[in-house]
Image (spheres, coloured by chain):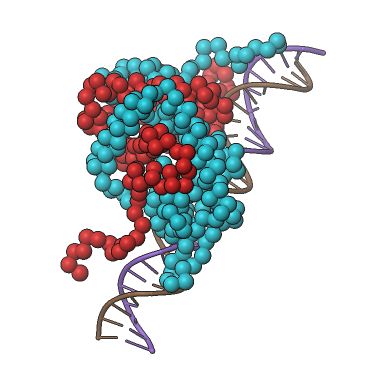
Chain colours: A cyan, B red, C brown, D purple
Amino acid sequence: MAETPEPAEPDGPQEPTLDEQIAAYQREYRDLDPQVEKVVSALGRLNRRMNVAYGRQVAALGISNAEWEVLKTLLLAGEPYRLGPGELAKRLGLTPAAMTHRIDRMAGEGLVTRDRDENNRVRVIVELTDEGRTKWLEAMRMASDFEEDLLQDLSPQERGLLGEMLIRLLRRVEHAQPDAGGRLTDLD
Amino acid sequence: MAETPEPAEPDGPQEPTLDEQIAAYQREYRDLDPQVEKVVSALGRLNRRMNVAYGRQVAALGISNAEWEVLKTLLLAGEPYRLGPGELAKRLGLTPAAMTHRIDRMAGEGLVTRDRDENNRVRVIVELTDEGRTKWLEAMRMASDFEEDLLQDLSPQERGLLGEMLIRLLRRVEHAQPDAGGRLTDLD
DNA sequence: TCTGAAGACTTCAACACTAAAGTTAGAGCC
DNA sequence: GGCTCTAACTTTAGTGTTGAAGTCTTCAGA
């Protein structure tokens, strides 16, 4: 056994390329518009790969993708970086129950604090700690470097055009389904 | 109580728009390139909304998004629509353990069959049933209608350009991280 | 042909999320 | 001031996923 880079898969099935995938779908469903499908499939694949990449990066900081989402949401709220569990849950697309547990963990790790609101003792206030803010900043640095690198092959004009087209699509999805369920899945 | 459409939230926090979000990040992290961030954030938001939409649509067919992914993967394999659990897991970005359970469910629902390979009794063969193929077709019909509608505001030229740019980005992600972990999350 | 090693699942324990039920504080009414 | 109603969480039960350990075939060498 010299080094044999190939893990011995003689003619095993291969992960299809985008074009192969679209061709396969077309074989089974004639009405498919290949151009539309190409855009949509590329969008989906790109996003998934990016999420994997983000996950690896923030893991290096000792936090999970899920925790990073919470940090981002609290930071977006602006000073003093406070939100209630309910509001957090809504923005993150989680149930309040899941939010309770996530806050537990993050409070245990010192990323946030959880306190009763003194003015209205039904409410709870989740607040970003300094450590949490620092983690966010570190993650943001890594993410924006990665994103900058990702878009390297696009000229400023192309970047502008791409952003503009994506926002047009976004408007269309948001208009088409005005948040029927209530929750919005996740945030950016 | 007449009808009061507003659920009484006097000045509560709002879900930020894309531009507000980018402005907020910039306040905390000066080096951020707003154009890059706009593209990336729009990409993320768009994708999440789309996934919610897909989920609602296939739910109407009585299947989950997760099950639809399996149907798509088996269909992509081409006739006779067979793959092993391991290969399925790899393509779907799941652990083999999760795949075992998912196949259990789907076999119980009659969407796939699970059998031992007679030539190599270690291997298992998961095969799409006719019902599974029908479900796929119905889901595909709904999805492609939705996607067609989504892209309605884009001219054919724009669609082509958008697809081409997305594929350039995709190439860059795939080149940057050659599948370091092994699993690829999920498929389109 | 027997034995050891590798491969392909499956099983098990732990964790995260959802839906639904439970708890507790504030608000409105009499 | 006590009653009910609602809001904002938390708890509980059940599902789906991961990582690690276990089982069962097959293959390669002695």
Residue B2 seen anywhere in this rendered image of the structure: yes
In the foreground, A71 or A44: A71
Residue B97 seen anywhere in this rendered image of the structure: no
Query: Residue B63, how many percent across, how many down?
Result: 35, 38
Q: Residue at x 31, y 24 (%)?
A: B162
Query: Residue B176, how many percent across, how many down?
Result: 52, 24
Q: Residue at x 51, y 65 (%)?
A: A115
Quadrant in which the C terminus of chain A appears:
top left
Whether residue D8 is situated above or below residue B143 in the rendered picture: below
Query: Residue A70, how many percent across, how many down?
Result: 48, 49
Q: Residue at x 33, y 30 (%)?
A: A160
In the foreground, B44 or B150: B44
In the foreground, A51 or C24: A51
Q: Residue at x 43, y 54 (%)?
A: A78
Query: Residue D12, how many percent across, how many down?
Result: 51, 61
Count all numbered tags in the image, as a single digit: 0
| A2 horizontally vs B181: left or right | right
In the foreground, B81 or B185: B185
The residue at the far front in this view is B30
Quadrant in which the N terminus of chain A appears:
top right
The residue at the far left in this view is B2
Q: Quadrant of residue B142?
A: top left
